[in-house]
Amino acid sequence: MLILSGQFANKKVISLRTGQEVAYLVGPIINPSNLKIEGFRVTDSKSKESLILLTQDIRQYDLSGIFINDHSDLSEEVDLVRIKDLLNMNFILIGKNVETASASKIGKVVDYAFDNTSMFIAKLFVSKPLFKSLNGASLTVQRDQIVNITPNKVVIEDLLSKVPAAAVNVAS
């Protein structure tokens, strides 16, 4: 099932063992090389300490929150050596500029949808600049249309690259 990133803003992290809220989500940890959500930054409900919840420790998603086994599933950043470089990168997808492979500016990422089983980002929702939005709605970019991701931008295929030539050259 695809989930919009906005649905996870400030969600509660609830322990299945105690039924109590143990933390709340702050933001995702996204690997820009494969667009996989590796985990979430969370804030401990009691100590207000910044911790990490890895996606493999999530047991269930619900409208009320995210469920984990227990508070012990939350880790301190220094304990996660495997994803240390990813944590230091602090990659944020929302707000990234989007342009085509031929350097045509499209807009900015305003939201994304991810698969809650694989945790891979499946779609990007891009808003067009104000002067371009007057003639159309926002753009949805599929995962397979993404060519490259840099620290500053997302590069997608040229928008007309897959349209047959006959469809483009319509005689009036």
Image: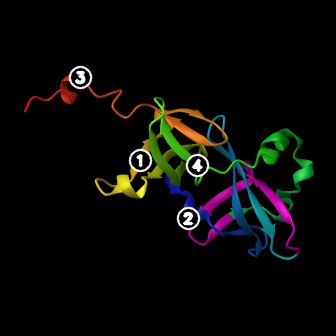
Residue 15 in view in this figure: no
Which residue has dot 3 on it?
Answer: 165
Amino acid type at mark 3? Ala
Which residue has dot 4 on it?
Answer: 96
Nearer the N terminus, badge 2 or badge 3? 2
Of residue 130 and residue 41, the one placed in the foreground of this image is: 130
Residue at 61% across, 49% down:
93
Q: Is the magenta stretch mostly helix, strand or loop?
A: strand
Residue at 44% across, 43% down:
141
Q: Do the residues labelled 2 and 1 touch (CB within 8 Å)?
A: no
Q: How far apart are marks 4 and 2 (CA)?
A: 19 Å
Residue at 82% across, 46% down:
88
Nearer the N terminus, badge 4 or badge 2? 2
Q: Where is residue 57 in the image (x, y as percent from the top left)?
A: 75, 53
Which residue has dot 1 on it?
Answer: 140
Q: Does the magenta stretch include residue 88?
A: no
Residue at 71% across, 65% down:
25
Q: Position of residue 62 (x, y in %)?
A: 58, 66
Q: Are marks 1 and 3 in contact (CB under 8 Å)?
A: no
State the extent of the magenta-drawn residues as a range: 47-66
Element type where label 4 sits in the image:
loop
Which residue has dot 2 on it?
Answer: 7
Amino acid type at mark 2? Gln
Q: Nearer the viewer, mark 4 or mark 2?
A: 4
